[in-house]
Image: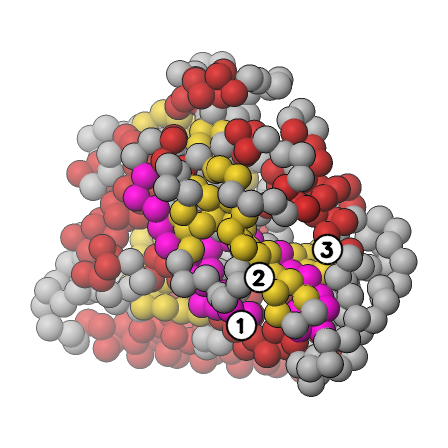
Amino acid sequence: MIIRLIGGTPMRGQADPSWRGAISDADAYDLTNDAARARILSANGLVISGGVDHLLLGRYREELTAFVRSGGRVLVNGQVVKPFIDGLAVWRKLEFRGAQDVRPHAVSEHPVWNGIDDRDLHYRTGVPGIHSYERLEEIGVAGFYGRGYHLDLPEGAQVITGIGSYRLPLDYAYRIGAGEVLVHGGNDLESFSDDGYSTRVLGPNLVAWLEAGRNDGARNDGGRDGGTSVRNGAQNGGTDAAVVRVLPAAAPADAAVARAARDARVSRESRESRESRESRAPGAAPRIGLLHCGAFQPLRTLADPALAPYRLESVYLPDADPAVLADLDVVLVSDRLHQGQLERFVPALLAALEDPGKTVIVLGENKVEQWLPGVGYTFRPTVFWKWRTGEDNGTRLRLPEDPMWEFFTPWSVSWHHHGLLHPRPGARSLVVMEEDGAEVGTLMYVDEVNQPARLLVTTMDPVYHHGSGFMPGASQLLYSLLRWVTATRSSAGKHP
């Protein structure tokens, strides 16, 4: 049995990257439930996706380490910020200037990479068809496989793939007891299994390697005897292996009372907070809170020295009280949040929209059509390669005289997007999508008329890409947003 821990709902339009149904998904927050955690830790192998909450995983470091020690195998994807298994090295960003700086190179043999030409890991493109390496050099985008490296590897670690001309450690493996940890410092490894290239074998190789793990799933003593129990259950395409999230059921009446009390408290604290903000010294910097779920992208964003002047405050949704939003001047809803964690904050976000002293910014892949009043959404696939091929991606800038353009450049808002928004009448659409000469939807808008607060919504995901160290335009958008909210806040604590 192989279980992949995911950080929430997959990105809309993304094909299921688990290989041919052999890997069953489980919400990482299921670890907080004793029964679900026991089932997860009874697997032969685990896959940690790149969108999982590192702070959550850190709370189960002993259990995850014991899983490996007793014979389990784990694939860790993404950029480790806070190690959650003994021996994990922290990921470091590579300062790259061109495609060859992020080229993967085979360093040593490992069964997961058997039969794979490392050139087939270098570029990705959405252009249909199978392309030669030379053609991909013209139309492909490099860096998806990896754009950083690891130092301070654990004793006995095996470097499998190096990055760039110096072959810096990108992929590595090491043993703990009877088990093994495999680390891939880039986009989820299983997503690179492509039938058109040598990487077609990556999926089968990975599944075979994970299934060979052995874990009895019953002990919590760290597996000191190096147990090697047989597989727990038969594999049948993921049906039996599915993990059902277990949540305590609340009585409807009790839930309604709790919601009413929470809404009343949020309203009261919002009013008190507004009075407190308006009494601050003129010219005080706004308090900016970044709502996030502990994935590596927002954690790296919060730690970025370039953003230190803005004093971003961490609002870690699993632990935070929604009432904390009341005392913020700017509520920045990070992209790709776990929908279950975000749902708990929706009443506080709606209360924030009723405060004329606030600015609320909602970034992409947060299903705003389900909770922002009057906002519609239309899916469009993500386009990440057209700037390489020279095709028109349909992005159009509007309202050139709008004062917003003092803070935003064309490059900061035209790198890519995740679908189309349809805002309420009166909102100012600054970036739109055009198809066949007709405007079909909005990619970024500002609304200062449909609620007391100032609202900016976009389907772009700058925190994700800035924190990943990928896509310079995304970093420009994040910087622009922060400059805008800081510069346009009046001395009274209200936007103009």
Does the stretch in magenta take in 22?
no
Q: Position of residue 414 (x, y in %)?
A: 36, 31
Q: Residue furthest bottom?
A: 221
Q: Earlier in the sequence, mark 3 or mark 1?
A: 1
Tell me if residue 79 is in the magenta stretch: yes
**Residue 191 location in percent, x, y?**
62, 41
**Amino acid under disc 1:** Asp
Q: Left of 446 or right of it: where is 53? A: right
- Label 1 SS: loop
Magenta stretch, residue numbers: 68-96
Q: Nearer the viewer, mark 3 or mark 2?
A: 2
Magenta span dominant secondary structure? loop
Q: Which mark sits nearer the N-terminus, 2 or 1? A: 1
Splitting the image into 4 quarters, where does residue 152 fall?
bottom left
Residue 164, relative to residue 41: is it above or below? above
Residue under numbered circle 2:
174
Residue type beneath disc 3: Leu
User: Mark 3 vs mark 2: which is more N-terminal?
Assistant: 2
On screen, residue 237 versus residue 411, left or right, reads right
Horizontal relation, residue 186 to residue 230: left or right: left
**Residue under numbered circle 3:** 210
Q: CA distance from mark 3 to mark 2?
A: 14 Å
- Name the amino acid, label 2: Tyr
Residue at (10, 64) in percent of width and height: 283
